[in-house]
Amino acid sequence: MAAQYPALQVVLALLAAPVCLILRRPNAAWAVATVITWISLALALSLLGRVLETGVILYPMGDWAAPWGIEYQIDTVNAFMLVIVTLIGSVVMPFARASVEAEIEEERIYLFYCMYLLNLAGLLGIAITGDVFNLFVFLEISSLSSYVMISLGRDKRALTAAYRYLVIGTIGATFYIIGVGMMYMTTGSLNMADLAAILPAVADSRTVLVALGFLTVGLGLKLALFPLHLWLPNAYAYAPSAVTVFLAATGTKVAVYAFIRIFFTVFGGVEIFTAGVIPQILAVLAALAMIGASAVAIYQTDVKRLLAYSSIAQIGYMVLGISMVTVTGLAGTIVHLFNHAIMKGGLFMAMGCILFKIGTVQLDQFEGLGKRMPVTMAAFVAGGFSLIGVPLTVGFVSKWYLVQAALEKGWWLAVAAILASSLLAVIYIWRVVEVAYFRPPPKGSAEVSEAPLSMLVPLWILIGASYYFGIDATQTLDIAFAAAETLFAPPL
Amino acid sequence: MTVELAILLAVAVPFAGAVLIPLTGAKPNLRETVTLVCAALLFYLVSVIYPTVAAGGVPEVYLFEMLPGLSVFFLVEPLGLIFAGIASFLWIATSVYSIGYMRGNNEENQTRFYAYFAIALGAAMGVAFAGNMLTLFIFYEVLTLSTFPLVAHSGTDEAKRAGRVYLGVLLGTSIGFQLLAIIWTWSLTGTLDFTDGGILAGKADGLTAGILLALYTFGIGKAALMPFHRWLPAAMVAPTPVSALLHAVAVVKAGVFTVVKVVVYIFGIDFLFDIGVSEWLQYMAAATILIASLVAMTKDNLKARLAYSTISQLSYIILGAMLVTDLGIIGSGMHLAMHAFGKITLFFCAGAFMVAAHKTEISQMRGIGHAMPFTTLAFFIGSLSVIGLPPMGGLWSKWYLALGTLETGKLWLLGVLMVSSLLNVAYLLPIPFRGFFSSPEENPPLKSSHNHDSEHDHTHDQDRPKGIKEAPVACLIAIGVTSAGCLVLFFYPDPVYDLMRQIVTP
């Protein structure tokens, strides 16, 4: 049984999606989605445990041997990704029930759960597969389902946001598949390990270079690398809260993972990345994202949009870590994938609670929220500390390793950018804090009215996790460093 | 009780207090009892640790591993014990004082006030007992964040603006400079433990060490070295007990304490002396001493004047550390204690003037000694100690700082200390003198609504200020204790001196 876990990891969610479609009843669909997510988490944890113990797991789909068949390859890096995605999903599901009821028309609720499961299957598929074309298929599954999820909300602006995401996302996927096609032209292979072995020999060909360019831009669009981030702010801001929480915490993270996989595994044996100008270009774009997006976040009046811009800045941190091409830098990126997922998930959940209660997340409507929704706002402040990088939070841990990596490289401007971006975070978080705590509640508002426990508990689980893993970061860092070392190890 | 347990409890008790205070918030008397019990217990715990450390021990308590190879742990050495002892003793005094002040002034949200106050004290204990720079940094930031609600306590626009400056400068310097210095030190040496003789010797060249020292010194914004001092005057918008204990003792002393710790245990006195990169920071400190004193003279608001005086006095401690001589370090450590007692007395008095007479401006305090003789006398005592005149404890620290400057052979630094003392005389002593020897009617008319009231009972106003009595008894008790402390430290400074002696002669 345990040998089939890699397949079950993806197939369960994929098969459960149509079940929701058939059930149609919101509560039943919710129950299916929740149970499936929790089982997926258990599978992911057991896979991670096995990888840490015995090393890489290879699983040929349908027993067709690689490189002709599709092979799932699970090492520390993607086992960790599987855990991140399913963990976030497991916390989001209990939260989603009340939140979705409030934000999505009742007759469409089952669609949300259906799309969520498809999305989950897609993200897990991207993470688990060892085949670049298979990755494309899962990329499309996750993208298409996320367009639908974003547009499910009552807010009509969500439709244009989803449409814009659809256009940009399709361009990204197309670029990716063009890149894959070109690689296939030159190498005749789609298996990642196989490609890694063949590519060094043909790396000089212009086709491979162009392929790399297409892959970079395609995935850059997916992970919202500045300046390819334009789809993200509105998509996050106008999507239903549960969707925002899940996508913000997992969607771009998985794209970052795919990026890492293409560069460090598929092109791992090629000098292009270690010697060329690509790292410098990435570093500059990352720094621009960290500073620029944080600065833009300061001027937002919609707090969900504010957090969305903050996400773009945080993706900058991750890309910066990648661009250093060192174990410390990459470990910083990988640990930040996890850390940012839990803190930003928590912050968007706080937004969900506020939307649930007062129906808007416009900053000027936050007056007196510190008194009206003390539990939610306390969570927001606690999560905000993590974004700033106050010690004992996960944000501090990520920042510590990214700064250390930059110091090792002697990249002083990168150090400055990381610290400056933290200080900008102080400003945008504090704008919200001042409105919520220093302005009196508007007249006639209820004294204290909090979101239901089913929302508050998941919220505090994520916020609590962002302190738990900030106080004892040894476990996550051990995994992150092991993962980073795997990526630098010579290909199989 | 073992010393290790006492250390843990010393950090835990204030935090436990912060939990209990909101629970007892509905009953103010019970709530204040919690604060007092915590403060007394804390001082007792510190006194349990004292004998071990005085005998040369360095008790250690391991907490947990935070990052691989980097743990959070406590280690009590003499300097930390001095800081903890002062902060915990003065917390008792401040708690008594707060009861009089907060009730006398009818402040709102008192429960929140006492709770954050307790957290701040717990953070100060964490700073004092930190075993490495990471632990110190954690509590340093907790101290910043927990004092923000105290600074912005009143919630007015002014308080909000002050809060922004406070947080902006303190977080800005700590994240922008200090954190960078810490991570840099870590990547150079692979350790952050406070070690006798420092950890950077042999690991960093002169230039790197110079940059690091600058990053640390300016990154420790709580030390208020110019140009990063603006937060301290801004913080004066807080209720007076906060200004007294936190912004004259716990927070600012946490700052200079960290500077001394970094100089002694991260760089090492010998290493720093050899590479000579601290010299320009002596100039910065000297400049801050003089400029802040001059600015203090121009301030009519009593708390603002005291704030600038604090900035100036903090730089005495930084100067003493940057001299990197034995006597300079001893002087720094002693000034930590002496200035704490002197300055908290002055702030207590300023608060008493405000509660009892509603006077905040110095120009309004002529003749106040007639109505409030006890408070004015205490202000006089505190002033003498801050200036450094006998028979007050402040003499000793200035004495050793002066000896330290002579050790380096820089006579002009001695000159700076002397000029500054004269400036202290000029901006502090006129206040009690005018209080005693002027008569109230020389006060220029107030612009506020007090004018209106005084028309009714004009005759009363002639010989003594309208209805002014001494401050609430609770305030007076606290003022009595701290001003007595200034005197006691003159006759009995030995514990502080002996502890500091241990640091320089291992």
Image (cartoon, coloured by chain):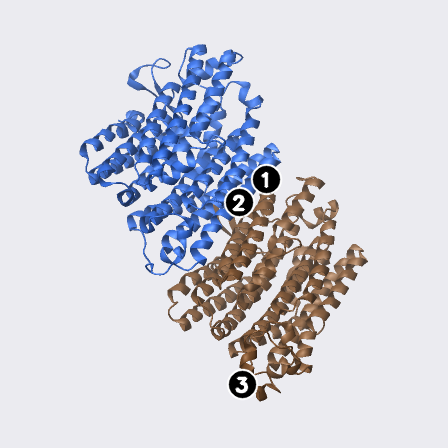
Chain colours: A blue, B brown
- Observer-side mark, 3 or 1, equals 3
Determine crowd level at label 2: few under 14, some 14-19, many 20+ residues with C-alpha closer than 10 A: many
Residue shown at 28% from the left, 48% from the top: A454
Answer whether labels 2 and 1 touch (C-beta < 8 Å).
Answer: no
- Name the one closer to the observer, B323 or B74: B323
Residue shown at 52% from the left, 33% from the top: A286
- Observer-side mark, 2 or 1, equals 2
Task: Give how far across and how far down residue A280 sits, in percent.
Answer: 57, 27
The chain holding disc 1 is A
- Residue type, numbered disc 1: Ala
Q: CA distance from mark 2 to mark 1?
A: 12 Å
**B298 relative to A76, above or below:** below
Answer whether labels 2 and 3 touch (C-beta < 8 Å).
Answer: no
The chain holding disc 3 is B
Q: Which residue is mark 2?
A: A424
Task: Give how far across and how far down residue B219 sits, in percent.
Answer: 61, 49
Q: Which residue is mark 1?
A: A416
**A277 relative to A436, above or below:** above
N-terminal-most mark, 2 or 1? 1
The chain holding disc 2 is A
**A189 relative to A411, above or below:** above
Q: CA distance from mark 3 to mark 1?
A: 63 Å
Determine the secondary structure under disc 1: helix
Task: Give how far across and how far down residue A309 sits, in percent.
Answer: 46, 39
